Amino acid sequence: MEIKDIISSGLLEAYVMGFATAEEISQVQAWAHAYPEVADELSAIEKSMEKYAFANSVEPARDLKSKILDKVSTNNSATKRNVVVEATPKKVYSMSPIWQRAAAAAILLLIASIVVNIIYYNKYKDADLAYQQKNEELIAQTDKLKSLDQDMSIVQNKYSRPVSLEGLPAAPEATAKIFWMKNTGEVYIDPSNLPEAPEGKEYQLWGIVDGKPVDGGMILTSKKGNRYHIQKMKNFGKAEAFAVTLETKGGNPTPKGSMFVMGKL
Amino acid sequence: MQDPQKHSEEDLVRLLQAQDQAAFSYLYDNYAGALNGVIFRLVEDIQLREDILQEAFVKIWNNFKQYDSSKGRLFTWMVNLTRNLTIDILRSKGYKKQQKISHDENSVSSYQDKNFGVEQFDSIGLRKQVATLKPDQKVIIDLAYFSGYTQEEISKEMGIPLGTVKTRMRTAIMELRKLLEFS
């Protein structure tokens, strides 16, 4: 390529403007090295662009110069003098504003993340609590269902023979049911229609065998216990009738309290 | 130029290579405005502009050994460094290349208003001279020089074929040189 072709190629301008490709850059540098005319032309383009930049100059803020000089002299003295003390603070000081902003942004992000974490943790705790409550409810329901199932299995047992115990003058409203198993002689009682036993008293079941009352065991009526559920009592063998009396807690060998309900087999 | 301690570019380069801080101060006084002009065209945020100019000068100081006078003038190296740094920073912040110039026809006079520092160069005279540059020639120069557009981007922006970008650029710069010949 002849020198005038090089000059008119537009590559020199592209080179100065900073948009030449890597290949073009090395080409231009080789030409400038080989031909003084090309070097001069390049320099002339550079100078005019330089002037153009000065024509468009914008003076920076006045205090910026001292900031920059400070920074440069700090960097410089730290490296030249090999200062051991204060090496760490110097490093911090020389962090560029861009990184300072990045660090600030990172800290803000971290704080935001912690806040979000706390919010979500609280939500999680609430949800977990609600879940546990539901779970407990479910367990309670299942327990209830189980005991109802048990009750039903006694009622539905084909050997079960129900005996209604009717209310006596002491408690005309009260009733109870005995389920007597013909095959095994087992005795179950459903006390759900007995009035609640007063403090210090308990209901006791009696089987009337050969005209005499025989202890059939204490009926649980405590609130936490199996009050409303059918419960297994003592075995009598063959009883003529059943009765329930209110006795002092723990029961008596022979009935002493008033009789509440009674029924014949 | 009123500065009594005027350095030739060669002296300045030699002193800076020796990490002379007085030379750096001189460099700042003489070139900060022109480099800031490039940043000004690319960045709207004042604080960010200051940060970038500061970083550019620190970089010039720290990397001065990389400057090779056989490959071009000092200012060309500094302006490329500053432009690339600015574009890198803008990119890292998610900005796209933008051209502030085209939206601001009276840019030359508006820069003058903001120009509150001491004029080291006769930039007012220069401003008057470049103000007569034809708008389509000014745009192509500004896109490349101030906005850091690649040839492809200029071709797209101006709607001219890629091959024409170089010749159009050459014509524009020739025109600019003519205007600046007597300064």
Image: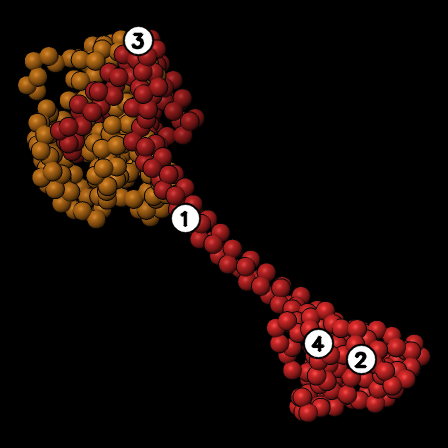
Chain colours: A red, B orange
Question: Which tag, 3 or 2, sits closer to the chain's start?
Answer: 3
Secondary element under disc 1, as helix, strand or loop, is helix
Task: Tell me the mark number nearer the camera, choosing from 1 and 4.
Answer: 4
Residue under mark 4: which chain is it in?
A
- Mark 1 sits on what residue? A115
x then y, percent, for residue B53: 24, 29
- Give the CA separation, mark 1 to mark 2: 69 Å
Task: Tell me the mark number nearer the camera, choosing from 1 and 2.
Answer: 2
Q: Quadrant of residue B23?
A: top left
Residue B169 horizontal side relative to residue B109, left or right = right
- Mark 2 sits on what residue? A206
- Give the CA separation, mark 3 to mark 4: 104 Å
Check if mark 1 and mark 4 are on a common chain.
yes
Three-letter code for the amino acid on which mark 3 is drawn: Lys
Q: Are marks 1 and 3 in contact (CB under 8 Å)?
A: no
Q: Residues within 10 Å of mark 2 (few under 14, many from 20)?
A: many
- Mark 4 sits on what residue? A247
- Give the CA separation, mark 1 to mark 3: 46 Å
Q: Are marks 4 and 2 in contact (CB under 8 Å)?
A: no
Residue B89 horizontal side relative to residue A221, left or right = left
Q: Are marks 1 and 2 in contact (CB under 8 Å)?
A: no
Image quadrant holding the C terminus of chain A, namely bottom right
Secondary element under disc 4, as helix, strand or loop, is strand
Q: Closer to the camera, A245 or A165?
A: A245
Three-letter code for the amino acid on which mark 1 is drawn: Val
Three-letter code for the amino acid on which mark 4 is drawn: Glu
Residue A237 horizontal side relative to residue B13, left or right = right
Q: Which mark is residue A80?
A: 3
Question: Which tag, 3 or 4, sits closer to the chain's start?
Answer: 3
